[in-house]
């Protein structure tokens, strides 16, 4: 519902009720006045007739002393009736003279006929019984709308009834009603139109202008003037809205400016970021290429470098085999040294290959039961374990998240070392696990020869050996590979050792992971 | 064919090896064998395929009883030679022993994927090498039952 409809709905009933009330009051006043006038007219007419025509004649008869002489009385009565006919001919209304028994003595209504409709007769009876003014409305065909008043004249036993035709009164009353209604409607229409025009001019039009201005503001369009200049609340609202629109416009411009600046900054940053990403991609590509090169190199090393070495050692051995007995002791010894050198170099090349493949050919991590790995490693080393009478004790170990093959190799290398570097007593190796903040710490401790403090960092260096080849053979690659495997699992391989009293190697492996891929 | 020392026909071995040193070592090792062997040596993959398919200049070549194959070969690689032999209807029954310096896992996997009959890493030590050759002889010519060559003679 629009504001206009609401206003109309609120205001229009007021003039409507006012006009209806005023009309009703006016109509009632008019009816009352008509009734009074009619009543006065009838009373006056009846009184004047009775007084001047009947009483006057009776008084005359009295003076003459002829009240008992019927011929005189009859003549006077006939004259009074004729006077009635003359009066009704001049004025509105009809006179009826009846006896108290209800017998109709004279009527001015039907001068040529004594017949009166029975319905009207009963209405006349009602008029005769009471001498007040009465209004009788017709109820049947034989009746009529009448206003009547009666008066008794006892000396002659007459009841004189003055009857006025109600039809005329009704007509005039309806005329009054109609004119009142017409005037009321006209006045109402004029007042309504005036109110509408005033409301339009002073309220609805400014509100419309404010509304369209607000719509413009809402649509982010600029407005200069709203066009409401009145000094009332609407005018104030309009001026405030103009101010507000101006402020909004300014704020909008400032905001737009800020957004523009920010957008530019963002674009610059995005550009920088893209450059950075591009650079990183290039670096990554170079890194990948370099990794591939390294892998290729490792493969070439394992294959192509081994070939000449094999030639050297094989043919030296073929010489010593073919020329058995023809070479002296020295020659055989030299050949042995040369062959041994070639073998060691071959082992080193294999070690290098292993070392390089920890990173390049590592497998994906999985949840792995350490107990199984230890079981497999000890099974693999069962010969050596038996040879030196070693005792290996592993507590209950956890499940960790790791590259299974590499952890297998790590533990195999550590156990091999523990078995190899033992003192006089048979080796005792303990494998335990303890929970730390970052993962499971695995400890491998032995009762072997131990490592002096100063050598403890060197043992992890490639090809670094602390002992003579004859006492403890080896390529010097095992711990370097171990360190690299632990590093691939994000941790550091550490050693704790006292020279002559055994060593403890320990490292941390990641906790078991929820794999719901 | 039951192969014994008394057999008139020698056992044919095709040695596919580009390194003359290695080829010679193999030949020297086979020299100490008690079996009557004939070593046919080719130096690259293309020659090997020509020999096996008797393309010139190998029209007179005999079908080998065993192939010793090195993987790294010039012209045509040992891998291609292996795959061609094993996908050739007449050649695929000839046992192929891959004898190579590489012990890289990818090479081993690849060789068996291509249906090599066995994969042996050439030992560094000559005595070991001798032992390997003797084992090859013993295994493939006395232990194993090979299908009879009806197809190609």
Image (cartoon, coloured by chain):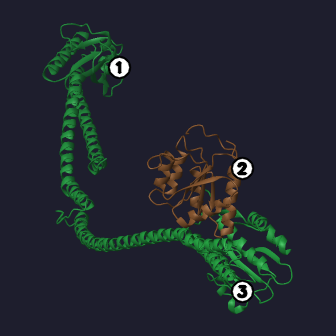
**Protein chain holding label 2:** B
Secondary-structure class at tag 1: helix
Mark 3–mark 1 Cα distance, whole angstroms, equals: 163 Å
Nearer the observer, disc 2 or disc 1? 2
Q: Position of residue B131 (x, y in %)?
A: 70, 63
Label 3 marks which chain's residue?
Answer: A
Q: Is residue B50 above or below residue A340?
A: above
Residue A197 vs A121, above or below: the answer is below
Helix, strand or loop at label 3? It is loop
Q: Which part of the image, by quadrant, shows the C terminus of chain B?
A: top right
Q: Is residue A514 visible?
A: no
Q: Answer left or right for B46 relative to A504.
A: left
Q: Are marks 2 and 1 in contact (CB under 8 Å)?
A: no
Q: Which mark is residue A126?
A: 1
Q: Position of residue A514 (x, y in %)?
A: 64, 61
Measured as percent of width and height from the top left, residue A151 is found at 30, 24
Mark 2 residue element: helix
Give the crowd class for mark 2: few <14, some 14-19, many >=20 residues within 10 Å.
Answer: some
Q: CA distance from mark 2 to mark 1?
A: 163 Å
Chain drawn green in the picture: A
Q: Quadrant of residue A237?
A: bottom left
């Amino acid at each position: 519902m629009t504001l206009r409809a609401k206003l109309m709905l609120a205001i229009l009933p007021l003039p409507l009720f006012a006009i209806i009330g005023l009309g009703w009051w006016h109509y009632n006043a008019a009816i009352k006045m008509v009734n009074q006038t009619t009543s006065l007219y009838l009373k006056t007419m009846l009184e004047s007739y009775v007084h001047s025509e009947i009483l006057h004649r009776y008084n005359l008869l009295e003076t003459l002393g002829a009240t008992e002489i019927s011929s005189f009385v009859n003549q006077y009565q006939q004259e009074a009736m004729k006077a009635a006919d003359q009066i009704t001919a001049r004025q509105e209304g009809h006179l009826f003279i009846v006896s108290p028994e209800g017998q109709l003595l004279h009527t001015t209504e039907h001068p040529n006929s004594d017949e009166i409709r029975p319905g009207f007769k009963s209405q006349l009876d009602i008029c005769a019984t009471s001498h007040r003014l009465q209004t009788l409305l017709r109820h049947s065909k034989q009746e009529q709308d009448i206003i009547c008043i009666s008066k008794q004249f006892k000396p002659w036993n007459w009841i004189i009834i003055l009857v006025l035709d109600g039809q005329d009164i009704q007509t005039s009353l309806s005329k009054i009603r109609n004119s009142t209604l017409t005037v009321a409607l006209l006045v109402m229409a004029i007042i309504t139109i005036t109110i509408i025009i005033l409301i339009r001019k002073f309220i609805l039009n400014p509100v419309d202008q404010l509304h369209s201005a607000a719509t413009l503001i809402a649509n982010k369009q600029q407005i200069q003037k709203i066009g409401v200049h009145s000094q009332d609340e609407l005018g104030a609202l309009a001026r405030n809205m103009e101010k507000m629109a101006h402020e909004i416009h300014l704020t909008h411009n400032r905001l737009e400016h800020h957004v523009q600046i920010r957008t530019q900054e963002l674009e610059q940053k995005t550009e920088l970021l893209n450059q950075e990403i591009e650079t990183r991609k290039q670096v990554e590509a170079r890194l990948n290429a370099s990794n591939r090169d390294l892998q290729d190199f490792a493969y070439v090393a394992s294959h192509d470098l081994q070939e000449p070495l094999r030639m050297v050692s094989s043919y030296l051995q073929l010489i010593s085999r073919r020329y058995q007995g023809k070479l002296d002791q020295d020659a055989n010894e030299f050949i042995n040294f040369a062959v041994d050198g070639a073998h060691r170099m071959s082992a080193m090349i294999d070690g290098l290959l292993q070392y390089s493949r920890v990173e390049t050919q590592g497998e994906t991590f999985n949840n792995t039961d350490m107990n199984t790995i230890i079981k497999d490693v000890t099974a693999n080393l069962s010969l050596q374990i038996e040879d030196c009478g070693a005792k290996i004790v592993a507590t209950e170990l956890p499940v960790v998240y790791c590259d299974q093959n590499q952890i297998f190799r790590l533990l195999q290398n550590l156990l091999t070392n523990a078995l190899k570097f033992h003192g006089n007593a048979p080796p005792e190796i303990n494998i335990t696990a303890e929970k730390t903040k970052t993962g499971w710490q695995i400890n491998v401790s032995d009762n072997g020869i131990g490592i002096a403090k100063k050598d403890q960092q060197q043992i992890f260096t490639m090809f670094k050996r602390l002992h003579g080849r004859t006492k403890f053979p080896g390529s010097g690659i095992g711990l370097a590979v171990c360190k690299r495997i632990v590093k691939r699992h994000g941790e550091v391989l550490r050693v704790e050792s006292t020279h002559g009293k055994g060593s403890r190697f320990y490292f941390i492996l990641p906790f078991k992971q929820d794999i719901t891929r | 064919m039951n192969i014994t020392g008394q057999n008139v026909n020698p056992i044919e071995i095709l040695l596919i090896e580009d390194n003359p040193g290695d080829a010679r070592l193999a030949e020297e090792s086979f020299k100490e064998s008690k079996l009557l062997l004939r070593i046919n040596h080719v130096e690259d993959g293309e020659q090997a395929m020509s020999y096996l398919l008797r393309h010139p200049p190998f029209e007179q070549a005999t079908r080998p009883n065993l192939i010793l194959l090195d993987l790294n070969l010039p012209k045509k690689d040992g891998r291609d030679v292996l795959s061609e032999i094993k996908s050739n209807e007449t050649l695929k029954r000839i046992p192929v022993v891959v004898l190579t310096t590489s012990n890289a896992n990818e090479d081993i996997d690849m060789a068996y994927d291509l249906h090599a009959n066995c994969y042996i890493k050439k030992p560094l030590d000559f005595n070991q090498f001798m032992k390997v050759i003797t084992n090859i002889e013993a295994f493939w010519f006395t232990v194993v039952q090979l299908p009879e060559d009806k197809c190609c003679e």
